[in-house]
Image: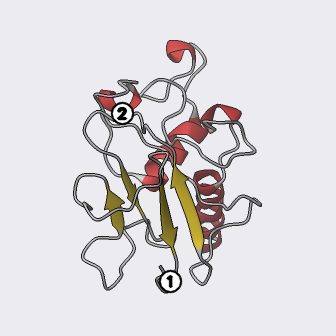
Amino acid sequence: TLVEAVRVANAMARSIAFRPRSPEAYLYGQGSGWYTPFIGGSYKWLWDKGRLGRNQDARLLFFYLATVNSPAVVLRMVGKGSQYALVCTDSDGKYFDGQTTYMLTLPMPVPAKDFWSVVVYDPQTRSQLQTSFPFPSINSLRNKDLVYDADGSVSLFFAPKAPSG
């Protein structure tokens, strides 16, 4: 039925968006879990400048997570433009769980000219997570109270309750 086809298509889209099939998506190898939604080097999602058609997985990966497209999304302008990295799994490869405490350590220097930002999204709605805080994010521009370690790194905690300290 059409209803069943929609369920299967949504499951396929979620699967590709939250654990991409393409090794090209992974920024530090598939074992790390960190990936980009902009694979293929073409905002038109073309393979070999269109000679091989469209990369449907790349297109699906991007549009399941985002709603706008521009040639700028595929440009690599480290230090100037926006660069996006996603992670949906912990160091054991398990999907994040809202009842668990996680720590992300950003080593310095983060390769960002103006600021870096970490935003938490709801995997069901693909919108920013609704919390009691005004923003479900932390960034180096707005959050001036971040505590940096002696080596310049900063550890961020994501948890249902703030950790002690």
Instruction: Check whether the beta carbons of the residues at disc 1 and disc 2 lie within 8 A of each other.
Output: no
The residue sitting at 60% across, 40% down in the picture is 57
Which residue position holds label 1? 164
Of residues 67 and 154, which is closer to you in this image? Answer: 154
- In the image, residue 152 sits, relative to residue 14, either above or below, namely above
What residue is rendered at 75% in x and 45% in y? 31
Give the image location of residue 97, x and y in percent. Answer: 62, 76
Quarter of the image where the N terminus is located: bottom right
Q: Position of residue 103 (x, y in %)?
A: 57, 65
Quadrant hosting residue 44: top left
| Residue placed furthest toward the front | 150
Q: Quick one: label 1 or label 2, which is nearer the N terminus?
A: 2
Relative placement, left or right, of 67 versus 144 is right
What is the total number of numbered labels drawn onto the structure image?
A: 2
Q: What residue lies at 45% left-to-right and 54% top-to-bottom? A: 65
- In what element is the residue under mark 1? loop
Residues packed near mark 2 inside 10 Å, few (<14), some (14 to 19) or many (20 plus): some
Q: Position of residue 12 (x, y in %)?
A: 65, 57
Q: Residue 79: which numbered mark, if any?
A: none
SS for tag 2? helix
Residue 128 found in image quarter: bottom left
Quadrant of the image occupied by residue 47: top right
Name the residue beneath numbered marker 2. Answer: 73
What's under tag 2, amino acid-wise? Val
